[in-house]
Image (cartoon, rainbow, N blue to C red):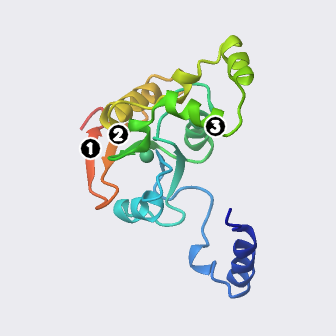
Amino acid sequence: MEKHLDRILEHNRSFVEKKEYEPYLTGRFPEKKLVVVTCMDTRLVELLPKAMNFKNGDVKIIKNAGAIISQPFGSVMRSVLVALYELHAEEVIVVGHYECGMASLDADVMISHMKERGISDEVLSTLENSGIRLNKWLRGFDNVTDGVRNTVSLIKNHPLLPPNVPVHGMVIDPNTGALDLVVEGYENK
Ligand SMILES: [Zn+2]
C-alpha cells in the first residue's frame, strides 16, 4: 500500500513555511450564506467550487457518498442545521452528480467484498439481528435526480428546519461542471 502520510507532512511543512495559505485566509461564516450538500466524488473536489463560483470562505460544503441524507437525525442533517442556526447560512443546495457511484452501488456485492476482506458472517448476522439492515443502509438510489429530490424533501420536511429556508436541488456533470436544476426552493419567485 502506498504511504501518503510522510509526503503530506513534508509538503505541509513547506506550505506553511512559504505562507502559501495566505490567499485562503478567510472567516468561518460563509460569505454567500449557503450550505451545500454534495458527493465525495474525486472529480468534484476542485470542479464543483469552480463551476459554482465558490472560493474559500464562501460556503459550507458537506460531503458524503452520493450527497444522500438518509437519516433525519444523522450527522449530515445535523451539519445542515448547525450551518443554518449557528453559522449564518440561509439557503441549502443539494448537488448530486451524473455517473455517481451510489447509483450503481450493489449492496450485496459490497457485503461480499466485506467478507473477502475478513468481516465474518458472525459479525454480519449479529448486526442484522440487532436491527441494522445492511442492505438498506448501504443502498444509494436508482437515479441521481430521484436521489437529489429525496434528499431535498427530507431536508425540507425536517421538523427542525427553520421556516422559510429555501432548499434547492441540482445535478452536476462531473466532466463539464454543467448544472441541471432539479428543485428550485424559492417559494415566492
Ligand atoms: Zn457520487
Question: Is residue 53 left or right of 74 when viewed as pictured?
Answer: left
As drawn, the label of residue 169 is 2
- Residue 38, numbered label: none
Q: Is residue 71 visible?
A: no
Q: Earlier in the sequence, mark 2 or mark 1?
A: 2
| For residue 179, side relative to residue 109 (left or right) | left
SS at badge 2: strand
Question: Mark 1 falls on what kind of element?
Answer: strand
Question: Looking at the image, which residue is at 28% across and 62% down?
Answer: 176
Q: Nearer the viewer, mark 1 or mark 3?
A: 3
Disc 2/disc 1 C-alpha distance (Å)? 6 Å
Query: Which quarter of the figure has residue 166?
Result: top left
State which quarter of the image contains the N terminus: bottom right
Query: What's under tag 2, amino acid-wise?
Result: Gly
Residue at x 68% of width, y 22% of height = 124
Front in this rendered view, residue 50 or 159: 50
Question: Badge 1: how crowded within 10 Å, few (<14), some, or many (20+)?
Answer: few
Q: Is residue 151 visible?
A: yes
* Residue 167 picture location, percent across and down: 39, 36
- Marks 1/3: CA distance? 40 Å
On residue 116, the disc is 3
User: Quick check: marks 2 and 1 in contact, CB under 8 Å?
Assistant: yes
Q: Residue at x 58, y 73 (%)?
A: 24
Q: Earlier in the sequence, mark 1 or mark 3?
A: 3
Where residue 181 is drawn, which disc sits there?
1
Above-or-below relation of 43 to 25: above
The front one of 28 and 73 is 73
